[in-house]
Image (tube, rainbow, N blue to C red):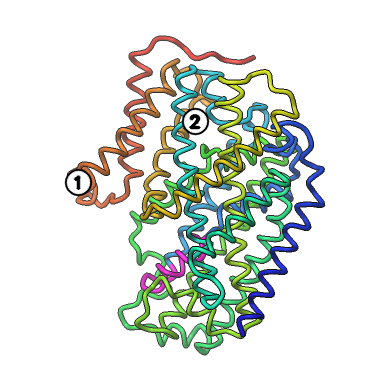
Amino acid sequence: MNWIPLTIVILYIVLLFVITWLTRRLSRGGMIGYLLAGRGLPFWVAAPLLTGLAVGGASTIGVAERAYSSGIAAGWYNAAWAAGAVLVGLIAARRYRALEITTIPEFFERHYSVSGRIVGVIGQLLLQIVITSLQYVAGGAILSSLLPDVFTFQSGMLVTAVVFVGITLIGGFWAAGITNIINVALIYVGVFLAAILAVDKVGGIDELVAKLPSSHPGFDLGAIGWSLVLAWFLVMCTMTFSVQSVAQISFAAKNSLSAKKGFLLGGLLILPIGFVSAIIGMSAAVLHPGIFPTEALPRTVLSLSPFVAGLVLAGLWAADVSTASALLVGSATLVVNDFIKRFLAPDLGERRERIFSRLSVLVLSVFTYLLAASVSGIVRTMLIGLTLTTAYTLVTLMTLFWPGICRRSHATWTLLVAMIALALWLILPQIPSFFQSINLPHPIYFCWIVSLVTFFLVAVLDKRKIKLEE
């Protein structure tokens, strides 16, 4: 019965491209029109764009995998993402939009130095390229796991790439936003339907609790350890303030109020998906004992009716495509704004800006696809790499809310030292061992300590105040 879910996925792909083609005129103009939607995103587009960026393979399949052995507590991953989005909405979204900037590194040069911008864009690009590569891997895994007679892992990756790269090339940020309305709706339908039917197959919530293995933590929210939960919240609340693809949603909003409302609504939309995916993983522990945890969600979906399986498959794949589109636009914006326009061709007209924007999308997509096909351990690299955003977030928030303490060399040195700290964490086993011994196992704690110490040392040693705007 593979033709039923395959037909649903094909119809979904066709729908995405039809919507992209119909909305392509919205992205007219140069780089701002194409990569920032002409700074015209209403909150009802910004919210699903943020939700689609947050809810990818890690938030669905990854959470179900962890919940297979750790229970409902795995859902804290998405709750942490939601908390970060709400914090940005309450604290920074309006101010980001009022700045009229295009990238975080541009903000650093405006207040600090050219070197701060260069270091900033290099770190941002490395981080976003790795996360984008993960989306190819997740897309290939979803299609090959749920339609093994149709897709291999490699062909699944290729189809995933063709879809989200095609959407981005044709319609830019507007297309990513509009198609994410469809994506988020499909994610909700697919994940909730899978959870409801899986629990029903077990016999209901009470039966699920009763049939779980005696060693399984079930609905214990603290089963994974509160220090790890806190680390997830620190990572996500840090990341949402300073990763380009997230901040870019604020920069592209119609106005400051739309930016704020988009992040607040996006946070509410992100929140439940993790806990619902965790329930699927817990149901798999009853329905399919003894499997590899990574098979928890795919195996559960395959046991449902072909029509339901098709909807769930399309929803899971939608989560991956929606994340990848926003990441690709964010990376292309960094290349065009912070390299090409800043150092190579500052006087580009609108037409050439649009050409370079599309070329950047194409080149980045090829590069990230090759990286995904050849590099292992991307998930671990992503989770560790996100801790680098401690330095970005610290410098950004200090500039916005405590500019009097900021000095000209803050951006350069805080970012560089944070990068070195991450490298030391990976190279010297003594550092993670020490933090594990004091029950702080995640590198986010180490990076926050290093970033804060560096920031305040620079504040003492450098007497040059930053450039402030009227």
**Location of mark 2 (residue):** 121
* Quadrant that contains the C terminus: top right
Kindly identify which residue carries mark 1.
429
Q: Amino acid at mark 2?
A: Val
Q: How many marks?
A: 2
As measured in the structure, the alpha-carbon distance from the residue carrying label 2 to the one carrying label 1 is 29 Å
Which SS does the magenta portion mostly show?
A: helix
Magenta segment range? 57-72
Name the residue located 69 percent from the left edge and 69 percent from the top edge: 10
Q: Residue at x 39, y 83 (%)?
A: 212
Would you say 33 lies left or right of 419 here? right
Name above or below for residue 223 compared with residue 350.
below
Percent coordinates x, y for residue 383 in the rendering:
40, 50
Residue 66 belongs to the span the image colors magenta: yes
The picture places residue 258, in percent across and down from the top left corner, at 72, 41
In-image side of 332 versus 19 (left or right): left
